[in-house]
Image (spheres, helix red, strand yellow):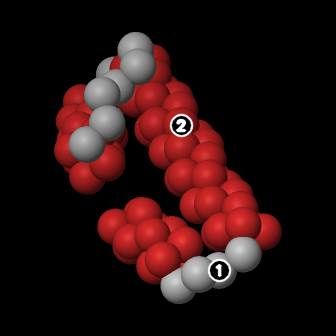
Amino acid sequence: MNNNNSYAEFLKAVGNNSTSLQAEKLLNEIYWDLFLQHIHREQTQARIMNLIDDALDRNDKEAFERYTQQLIDLSEEQEYHLEL
C-alpha cells in the first residue's frame, strides 16, 4: 500500500458505510505497511553504515564517499533524520 494513499483509502472505506471490522482491517494494513517500511529503512541505514565503516577501515576514500552519499540520499528520500 502506498503511504500517500493509505489515509485517503481509510477515509474512503469508512465513508462508504463500511463496517467497523473492515475499517479496522484496513487500518491494520496501513500500520503494517508503515512498520515494514520503518524496519526496511533501519536495516538499509545499518547496512550502509557498516559499508562506511569498512571503507574507513580500508582507507578507501572513494567507497567512503559513495556510501556516505547513499546514506544522505536515503535520508533525503525518506525525509528521515539519521540516527547516529
The residue sitting at 31% across, 48% down in the picture is 78
Which of the two residues, 16 or 9, is positioned nearer the viewer here? 16
29 left or right of 69 in image: right
Residue 83 % position (x, y) = 41, 19
**Identity of the amino acid at label 2?**
Glu
Label 2 residue SS: helix
* Image quadrant where one finds the C terminus: top left
Visible in this render: residue 65? yes
- Residue sitting at 26 percent across and 52 percent down? 77
On screen, residue 56 versus residue 25, left or right, reads left
Indicate left or right for 51 with 73 as reference.
Answer: right
Q: Earlier in the sequence, mark 2 or mark 1?
A: 1
Which quadrant would residue 3 be assigned to in this image?
Answer: bottom left
Asked if residue 15 is positioned above or below residue 50 in the image, the reply reads below
What is the residue that sits farthest to the bottom in this orientation? Answer: 16
Instruction: State the image coordinates of residue 64 (x, y, percent, origin top left).
Output: 29, 32
How crowded is the residue under tag 1: few (<14 C-alpha within 10 Å), some, or many (20+)?
few
Can you see residue 29?
no
Q: Position of residue 13 (x, y in %)?
A: 55, 78
Mark number for residue 18? 1
> To which quarter of the image does residue 66 belong?
top left
Residue 42, label in figure: 2
